[in-house]
Amino acid sequence: MKFQKFVKALGSDGIVYNRKNGERGLASERVFMKIPEDIRSVTCADIADMPDFVENIINYAMYVSAKKK
């Protein structure tokens, strides 16, 4: 799903999560999508730091995909 379509479907009900490395993501109840770097503003219900367990899952997935290359 493209980010713009995800934002339209979500409306202002999403949560922006800030990662430790500076990346940002927009989340609904079931879907998380990285906010592209060229997007400067998103209307959302809340802004929070990325929970540690989610950060660990993302880091592990990136490690595994890099290892397969």
Image: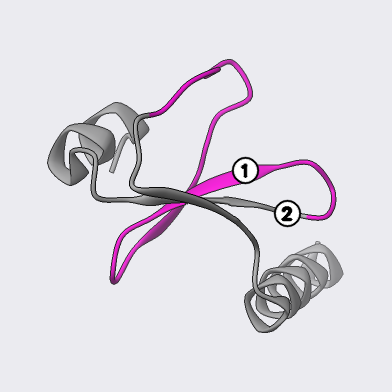
Q: Residues within 10 Å of mark 2 (few under 14, many from 20)?
A: some
Residue 7 percent location from the top left of the image = 27, 35
Which residue shows up at 34% across the image and 30% down it?
A: 43
Residue 36 percent location from the top left of the image = 55, 29
Which residue shows up at 75% across the image and 79% down it?
A: 56
The answer to which of marks 2 and 1 sits earlier in the sequence is 2
Magenta part of the chain = 20-42
Q: Residues within 10 Å of mark 1 (few under 14, many from 20)?
A: many
Judged left or right of residue 65, residue 28 is left
Q: Secondary structure at mark 2?
A: loop
Q: Are marks 2 and 1 in contact (CB under 8 Å)?
A: yes
| Colour pattern of the rendering | one colour
In this orientation, which residue lies closer to the viewer: 47 or 60? 47
Can you say which quadrant of the picture contains the C terminus?
Answer: bottom right
In the image, farthest residue toward the front = 46
Residue denoted by label 1: 24
Under mark 2, the amino acid is Arg
Residue denoted by label 2: 19
The answer for how far apart the CA atoms under marks 2 and 1 are is 6 Å
Residue 50 lies, with reference to residue 35, above or below; the image says below
Question: What secondary structure is the magenta-colored segment mainly?
Answer: loop
Q: Secondary structure at mark 1?
A: strand
Can you say which quadrant of the picture contains the N terminus?
Answer: top left
Under mark 1, the amino acid is Arg
